[in-house]
Amino acid sequence: MDWFTAPGYWLSRLVFQRALAGVYLFAFLTAALQFRALLGERGMLPIPRFVARVPFRRAPSLFHLRYSDGFFAGCAWAGCAVSVALAAGADSELPLWAGMLLWLVPWALYLSIVNVGQTWYAFGWESLLLEVGFLAVFLGNDEVAPPFVVLLLLRWILFRVEFGAGLIKMRGDACWRKLTCLHYHHETQPMPGPLSWFFHHLPGPVHKAEVAANHLTQLVVPVLLFTPQPIATAAASLMILTQLWLVASGNFSWLNWITVVVALSALELPTDRTAAPPAPLWYEAVVLAVTALILFLSYRPVVNMISRRQVMNRSFDPLHLVNTYGAFGSVSRIRYEVVVEGTLDGTPREDSDWREYEFKGKPGDPRHWPRQFAPYHLRLDWLMWFAALSPAYADDWFGGLVERLLEEDRDTLRLLRRSPFQPGEPPRFVRARLFRYRYTTWRELRETGACWKRTYVRDFLPPTRLATRTRRP
């Protein structure tokens, strides 16, 4: 079928596939290095407990068959290895069917992780990676030209990501309509980056221009993805530039990067390869069947987008094949942070020697300048931001965190930047307090060297100790 392939997108597919493999690598690396404290057998939300109460049909996962920390680690590191192989172009060295199976491996492994990840994996970019990764299976390798319908489906994802996010903003916080949200957002976003302080101190008119440009990119430009070239390439390029601006302004895991990756598939990049053998009939049949399935399932996100009760970051099927996206429908005006402290004193008092635990990404010490972590995802730090918004977000895991700090759990301490206690000398009590944080002014920064100024608000958790002191291995 001449209409089946898009020979002008050889290089676009290559760049897209290699970049997607890179995002997969960060996702699996995040899982491998953090799972024991979060989801392991002795984690805050253990996977064995989850699979015991949630059936396979609701959350398909390899870990329904068996679970051990070693098996999870093996799956995560295997995902890293396959991602590296795909980034190196291993799929192009295989027959078409084998290359497709190789792309299926990271999708199946990551689906298994997300479906048992519970609160730690309840982020929109998890489903986005799975949705994009599923389509990547059917994009083919060097044996066939890129299927035109799969490229269109990738643009359909990009449209929903951007347009859905634009709608959720216009229907949400009034500051988006007044163009004032970025007067606050750079300061109150979940995890600021090293440049966020400077973004926050941009002049007000620049902030308004940022918001206006965001509305243009999310509500107008996505429609142009379905126009002829070079207009579609220009639209995708503008989206890439917008996403790179967001990368510079904060740490949003791989959300911006996976959006850039999908936009790459819409670019018509120069290539001298325009011919290929006809695609096998079985391949065309599989691709068309998958296309029909995705189009059928797409009615749910479409209904959600046009609904006045639009929800964001919702998956409509257990395989995460078609999802709805969106972020920051409302923007906090004030930043709160939960500060966790411990003491060696046997009787906790206000004047006890309380020592602060330092997290890797979330603000703590006012003098500690934020670092760039994205696309690596610090899951505990992100959930601590939600906990500061409302204790309800932390009901199912915060007690487990405190318990593990009291027990000097090594896997939990590895998630932190610094523990204030020497090994073998865990705290007797741990408490948590809520502080208001604001960026310092230029003058305060020069005088103190601190990028944050914080003010005590109230207790978040009173001093807590173990009923029976034990130490985790």
Image (spheres, rainbow, N blue to C red):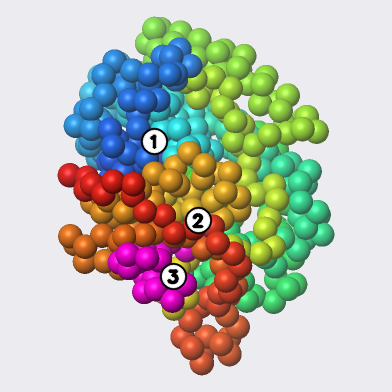
Instruction: Please report whichever mark, 2 or 3, sits nearer to the chain's N-terminal start.
Output: 3
Q: Name which residue lies at 74% across and 58% down.
A: 212
Q: For the residue carrying disc 1, how many other residues have a C-alpha within 10 Å: few (<14), some (14-19), or many (20+)?
A: many
Cα–Cα span, label 2 and label 1: 20 Å
- Between 428 and 394, the one lying in front of the other is 428
Q: Name the residue under label 3.
A: 349
Q: Where is residue 200 in the image (x, y as percent from the top left)?
A: 61, 71
- Between 334 and 215, the one lying in front of the other is 334
Please say whether residue 362 is visible from this viewpoint.
Answer: no
- Between 454 and 247, the one lying in front of the other is 454
Q: At label 1, which amino acid type do we have?
A: Leu
**Residue 397 occupies quadrant:** top left
Element at label 1:
loop
Q: Where is residue 169 in the image (x, y as percent from the top left)?
A: 73, 47
Q: Mark 2 points at which residue?
A: 461
Q: Give the range drawn in magenta.
A: 338-362
Q: At label 2, which amino acid type do we have?
A: Leu
Q: Name which residue lies at 31% across and 60% down.
A: 428
Classify residue 231 as left or right of residue 86: right
Say if the magenta span includes residue 361: yes
Secondary structure mostly taken by the magenta-highlighted segment of the chain: loop
Element at label 3:
loop
The label on residue 45 is 1
Cα–Cα span, label 2 and label 3: 14 Å
Disc 1 to disc 3: CB gap under 8 Å: no
Say if the magenta span includes residue 197: no
Q: At label 3, which amino acid type do we have?
A: Arg
Q: Name which residue lies at 51% across and 63% down.
A: 433
